[in-house]
Image: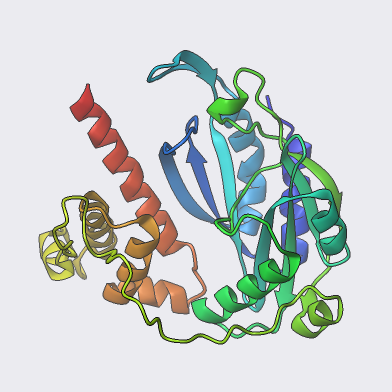
Amino acid sequence: MGDTAAALRMLDVFTSVGATSFVVTKTGLEWKDHKQVKWGKTYRAEELRKLLPAMVRTASVKRPMEVPGQGTVEAGENLIIRPGGPGVAFVQLDDLNAEQLDRVRPAAFIIHATSPRNYQAWVAVSGVPEGKEPFKDIMRRVRKAVGGNDKSASHATRVAGTENFKLKYAPAFPTVTIVETHPGRIMTAEQLEGMGLLAPPEIITPPTQKFTDTSLNRTGRERQWPSYEMSLAKAPQGQDGPDRSRADFWFSYLALQRGWSAEETEAKLLEESEKAQERMRGGDTGYVHVTVANAAAWLERSRQKTRA
């Protein structure tokens, strides 16, 4: 039924270093090139603490699932959280070996294993200017200093006490296990630099060679963004005008359908949507991610029905 005490302990450690909200996502059984997002939602920390035990229990329920070429596999749901909070950058370091783990241990506020010998550490950094680019910069510099870890880490983590439902582990799915915690441990950039955990800023030079144009779809034709104005015009009308949440959802759905990645769609939605911008200014950093995640889940279900 899952270890709810471990899940709550992880949540408390994150809140101790400044996490005030969490984007919670559930995904089905994962394997290469397959990650079905079932739903996503943003919760305040105190709200999530009340709901987390039930989420952990629900995620642990295993049901049969047909996997192409693999037959039937009994699996539950992956429970994933992405922390957010004002004034703190949460840096995720994944796939750490023993030497890297020892280097980052004095700075990490939590270290856990998502599978046997697969360690993940998180570092909370204060004093990072608000905005996406300053966060990306500090993240790149820490990862570069540690070296060799997974640069595709998503800034989200599986919840402790839940199982890691990846096909490669079936049928003995490993449980996410806390290795050590250091509540309240927040680092500054100066402290990380003194510990050798912050690489110098990158000097970015313009490319001299033209690389593959990522704006092209698989047929070689140029991809086009859907019209946000059209999505807004077709959204249901409320007392205060069009339902902007619905417009954001359908814009995201159409963008993903046209081949734009989730990350590209999140960036474009933030650029186009006044509601997304208002939510971001208000400290809700999860609105855009949740909207795109839900659109991706809906698109996946639509494609499954078509294949059936």
Q: Quadrant of residue 34?
A: top left
Give coordinates of residue 129: x percent, y percent. Answer: 60, 85
Which residue sits furthest front? Answer: 209
The answer to whether residue 131 is seen in the rendering is no
In the image, residue 306 above or below residue 201: above
In the picture, measured across the screen, residue 242 lies left or right of residue 69, that is left
Between 62 and 242, the one lying in front of the other is: 62
Colouring method of the image: rainbow
- Residue at the image point whose x is 48% and y is 38% from the top: 27
Q: Is residue 129 above or below residue 255?
A: below
Q: Is residue 94 above or below residue 123?
A: above
- The residue located at (37%, 76%) in the rendering is 277
Q: Quadrant of the N terminus?
A: top right
In the image, 60: left or right of 285? Answer: right
Q: Is residue 246 above or below residue 302?
A: below
Q: Is residue 104 visible?
A: yes
Residue 160 placement (x, y as % from top left): 72, 41
Q: Residue at x 29, y 61 (%)?
A: 245
Relative side of 105 to 243, left or right:
right
